[in-house]
Image (cartoon, rainbow, N blue to C red):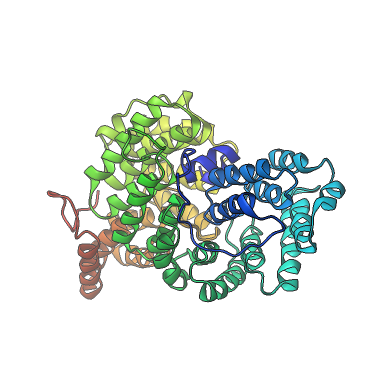
Amino acid sequence: MTQRSLSFAVATALCIGATRALPAQMPHLGTIQFPTSSSGAAQSQFITGVLYLHSFEYQAAAAAFQRAERLEPGFVMAYWGEAMTYTHPVWNQQDVPVARAALARLAPTPGARAAKAKTARERAYLGAIEILYGEGSKAGRDTAYSRAMERLAAASSGDAEAQAFYALSLLGLSQGERDVPTYMRAGAIAESLFAALPNHPGAAHYVIHAFDDPVHAPLGLRAARAYSAIAPDAAHAQHMTSHIFLALGMWDETAHANEVATVAARDSGSKLPRVSCGHYGEWLQYTYLQQGRPAAAAQLLEECRLQAVAKPIPRLQTSLAVMRAVQIVDGGDWNGPATRMNVDAAKQPAPAQLFLHFGSGYAAVKRGDTAAARSALAALAKQSKDADAYDRICALELEALIALRAAHTEQAVSLLRRAVAIEDSLPVDFGPPLDVKPPRELLAETLLQIGRAAEAQTELERQLTRTPRRAATLAALAQAAKTAGKSAVADAANADLVRVRHKSEPGVSAKPDRK
């Protein structure tokens, strides 16, 4: 059910939105110095492409590099740049055939392409990209490419772009799962670059990616506060700041970042006020629910539904399913509009089906419809034959809730401890919980329900280290601590929940009862 399991094209679109027309004037994307053997119009388009590339606006970057190619067909670095847009290191994605085709337009073989390079530096950049899209496994090519970038960066200590792209290559070495020591190496390089070049978009961006987990997020806060102003015309830059804000439970800042990003990501000339489906919309909806704004979250979901109906493509359908499940779980919509949303799971892409079944099953068991919950669990199990870890967690959670409804409390606790063990074995990921309902939170709520408040309090305090200031965790902690006789802990949790929900909608309590 993770975004990383999606296809290259689908996951790219989920993160960056639809293709947008470029602004009529030079976009504001930050500042870099990247001299090449070219000059004039082609070089200008090349710089624009690299600026977009640093902000992961891959489609806009590719378009700029292609314009540079047309202006100067033998411009080696333009083809290098276009090929770079087809690898997304942090998301563990590569479109190798398309990248190779882009390079082949320069010349048919690596040797012939190298012969077109006019400087040793350009040959080094081109040689690195040839390694990235050469023979062998993706992991092997990524590793060899990173070593090539390390050599290039070492040989040209004053080349900020080599330093930046070397840092980015390190982020890609863990193949989509956070390897903390490697991320710290990347972060140290990017932080040094950011200190020297505070308007460099890649430096700020890669600092944020290196540190966007709850433990290290304070190290990225300076870059997060700066990045949106560095690249105001990049929607991804507006969103990206929230990777740090969310990891610190800074909900007002997270909401603002994604409100701006959803508007910035819309198509040129679109009649829609924002792009409600997709990565930015999903983060915004989740944040609204933390703030106690279920109506605002439901409005986003409805806008996404309308977009998915108007354009029934996989990326929108998957986003709709994600947002529906989150509205059910975090919005407590057991029998409301989200639950009743008419979506035929059988006609949806596989990731969407998984989210739809989990959301439906969770709502069913919460409203006491065990038969419907069992049906959803069966569908989820059938769909999850090749499930990743988060899919298994969701299946265990649903099975545990059904067991709890049948008063099989020890079975429910055992199932949830299995789910917790799976999540604990995984690197801490960025963003809203990939399993929708954190299993340790659900375990704690179950322990509290069966009279084991002290155990519940321990689990909830641990959960807050993974999802800081998550509203449901704080609410449950306040209740568990109060029941366990820990009034100071309960008061602190309640006070923090009031701060989290200071913008809550009328009629929504700042200290809601747990569902």
Indicate left or right for 401 with 90 as reference.
left
Indicate left or right for 78 with 217 as reference.
right
Q: Quadrant of residue 108?
A: top right
Indicate left or right for 4 with 444 as reference.
right
Near-viewer residue (393 or 169): 169
Which residue shows up at 23% across the image and 63% down it? 497
Up-down: is 467 above or below 56? below
Can you see residue 388?
A: no
Q: Quadrant of residue 300?
A: top left
Can you see residue 221?
A: yes
In percent of width and height, residue 82 lies at 65, 46
In percent of width and height, residue 174 lies at 64, 59
Near-viewer residue (417 or 248): 248
Which residue shows up at 58% across the image and 36% down it? 385
Which residue shows up at 33% across the image and 35% down it? 272
In percent of width and height, residue 125 lies at 74, 58
In percent of width and height, residue 367 lies at 26, 37
As drawn, the residue found furthest toward the front would be: 40
Near-viewer residue (216 or 188): 188
Up-down: is 188 above or below 430? below
